[in-house]
Amino acid sequence: MHILDKLKKDHQQMKQLLMIMEVEIQHFISGERLDYDLFCSALEYLNRRVLINHHFVEDKIFELAQKRGAIAADGRHNIPLEHEKIAFLSTALKEALDKVEADNELPRIWLMSVAQEYLQAQRRHMREEEIMLFPAAKRGLLNADWEEIEKFMISRSQDTDIDENDLEDMRKDVLAWHQEVYA
């Protein structure tokens, strides 16, 4: 599978879990109980997904695309900075969820706000990559660049203790869990 195809597939799978999180937050906003475990499992999947050859690969693609002039180095687009923002928002969301789970008295609007900011940032970021980064990489990177990215991916895979198959099982479990809850 080509690197861009894998990244697009990752995005599709991530969007499925973002949708589940959106449904859970909407139920919470309407006064129902948040399925904390389901929501946190979806968030954990997303956090693990980006650690396995996703954000690091996109950062490498961005770097090489700028080097080749396929993306202007004018600061309008900064994929690595967006990845940092998403990591920050993910941490803030996890902390907010932990406070809710610990029964801290927090306004629903506060958790809703943190969750919606995270969800919107994720969606906006993936859309920008799909509209700007991936096409620029496709037209601007050389075969040698793709080979460098491939080597980078292999190296990164060896540096993480997250298994791709375990992660896929986790995604399927979250999808099945959501299906069971809302069937």
Image (cartoon, grey):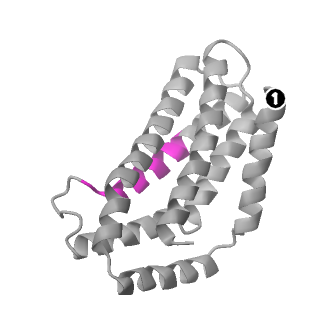
Q: Which residues are magenta?
A: 77-92
Q: Nearer the viewer, residue 168 or 92?
A: 168
Q: Nearer the viewer, residue 71 or 44?
A: 71
Tag 1 secondary structure: helix
| Residue occupying the point 55% across, 77% down | 156
**95 relative position to 144: left or right:** right
**154 relative position to 136: left or right:** right
User: Residue 170, relative to residue 174: is it above or below?
Assistant: below
Q: Position of residue 178 (x, y in %)?
A: 76, 35
Q: Quadrant of residue 97?
A: top right
Residue furthest to the left in view is 74
Residue furthest to the top in view is 31
Q: Position of residue 103 (x, y in %)?
A: 71, 25
| Residue occupying the point 45% across, 36% down | 120
**69 relative position to 133: left or right:** left
User: Residue 27, relative to residue 173: is it above or below?
Assistant: above
Question: Badge 1 is on which residue?
Answer: 181
| Residue occupying the point 62% across, 42% down | 16
Q: Nearer the viewer, residue 69 or 55?
A: 69
Quarter that holds the N terminus: bottom right
User: Residue 89, relative to residue 57: is it above or below?
Assistant: above
Q: Position of residue 183 (x, y in %)?
A: 82, 26
Q: Position of residue 138 (x, y in %)?
A: 35, 68
Q: Main secondary structure of the magenta part?
A: helix
**180 relative position to 50: left or right:** right
> Which amino acid, by three-letter code, is at mark 1?
Val
| Residue occupying the point 55% across, 59% down | 50
